[in-house]
Image (spheres, helix red, strand yellow):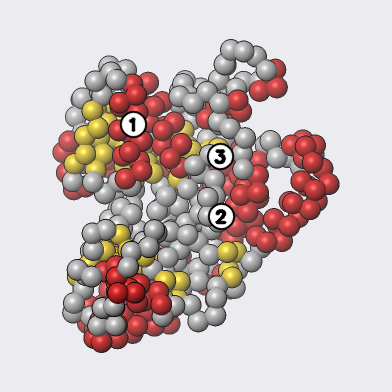
Amino acid sequence: MTDFDKTRHFFTLPEGMIYLDGNSLGPLPKSVPARLERMVRDEWGEMLITGWNRAGWMAMPRRVGDRIGRLIGAPEGSVVMGDTLTIKVYQALASALDLRPERRVILSDFGNFPSDLYMADGLVKSLDRGHELKIVAPEDVEAHIDDTVACLMLTEVDYRTGRRHDMAKLTAKAHQMGALSIWDLAHSIGALPVDVTSGGADFAVGCTYKYLNSGPGGPAFIYVAPHLTDTVRPALSGWLGHEAPFAFDIDYRAGAGIDRMRVGTPPMLQMAALDAALDIWDEVDMHDVRARSIALIDLFITEVEARCPDVTLASPRDGTQRGSQVGFRHPEGYAVMQAMIARGVIGDFRAPDIMRFGVTPLYIGEAEILGAVAHLEDILKTNEWDTAQFRARAAVT
């Protein structure tokens, strides 16, 4: 059994703050500063460039990738770290299209993270081979998987509403029709049990600065199903994806297996922060986390609906159908959220009208849920949100 009283003490959180935005940026694990200090002082400071060999920096993307793999049900040697999620989406999509040269449709949905759609649109225009990015309603995805689809590209958990796709079901339909599947796990990993193996995913990508707490700009990961790793052609032929980077050949030869999905020099400070942050997951059972998440969000929904009649639930009511976040609609949702933040209740806003709250059981319990609801109720009853200060849009919402 996971001891959630113990896991709460793994994190640095300001006194009095109710932090409900770990689905966007996870808090600082207490182990990270010491690890970064060691990395800077003892490795970078003392070893300098010899750290690539002596401190194992060069192998770290694979080693940490295997730690990520254990959280998504991926076999050893099928996940590698590096670059950003946007880059990993591009790699996965370009490789998938290359494996289905006779097909032209990329199928996605309106719940996908816009950045993924931007990358797909840009790739379609760059290829200029008649590909089409087809975007449908989330509930209509299955009906649109046919023999014209080259790949299915979805985010498992909708970033706004928390609505969860059925990976295994949709991937099975894609395979039945001869298509490949790409899953963005940014809002899944660390929030709920994921199994890309039983789910049949061909590719999976994700960031690590949300539920995995690697810090702002933390490195992303990419998974490639083992039966594809030696056949995919990496669209970004980066130096560290080469079979022999230090041979300095003029011609590119893809590395073996998942190494071919490496691109540039890994961000070692961020990688060290992630490595330290992942230690928390050695103490945690994801099924316990999932059960606790569903219970806490159910409580949140019940209390908000009983006490805040001006808001409307934007997330699935059935906990098994959502991730570890809940959204509520309000026509002045942005201003209401700013008033919440001013009181130390940190959530965020997603256009056009969704107040979004992430619930991370590792450091959130019933007291925080009830406290957040009490603040929301008071702000709505008193119209505290209705000021120029709270209506003024910041660069990040």
Q: Where does the image place residue 292, in percent across and percent down from the top left? A: 41, 69
Q: Residue furthest right?
A: 46
User: Residue 255 sits in which quadrant?
Assistant: top right
Residue sitting at x 63%, y 54%: 273
Which numbered disc, 1 or 3, marks the residue closer to the eye? 1
Q: What residue is disc 1 on?
A: 122
Q: What residue is disc 2 on?
A: 214
In the rendered structure, which amino acid carries the disc numbered 2?
Answer: Ser
Residue 271 is left or right of residue 38, and the answer is left
Location of the C terminus by quadrant is: bottom left
Earlier in the chain: of badge 1 and badge 3, it is 3
Residue 263 is left or right of residue 318, and the answer is right
Q: Is residue 386 above or below residue 154?
A: below
Report helix, strand or loop for mark 2. loop
Residue sitting at x 80%, y 51%: 42
Earlier in the chain: of badge 3 and badge 2, it is 3
In the rendered structure, which amino acid carries the disc numbered 3?
Answer: Gly
Q: Where does the image place residue 32, in percent across and percent down from the top left? A: 65, 60
Q: Is residue 340 above or below residue 239?
A: below
Which of 268 and 365 lies nearest the eye of the viewer? 268
Report helix, strand or loop for mark 3. loop
Q: Where does the image place residue 146, in percent across and percent down from the top left? A: 19, 29
Calculate the distance from the C-alpha at mark 1 to the C-alpha at mark 2. 28 Å
Q: What residue is disc 3 on?
A: 82
Q: Are marks 1 and 3 in contact (CB under 8 Å)?
A: no
The answer to whether one can see residue 197 in this image is no
Residue 321 is left or right of residue 289, and the answer is left
User: Residue 258 sits in which quadrant?
Assistant: top right
Report helix, strand or loop for mark 1. helix
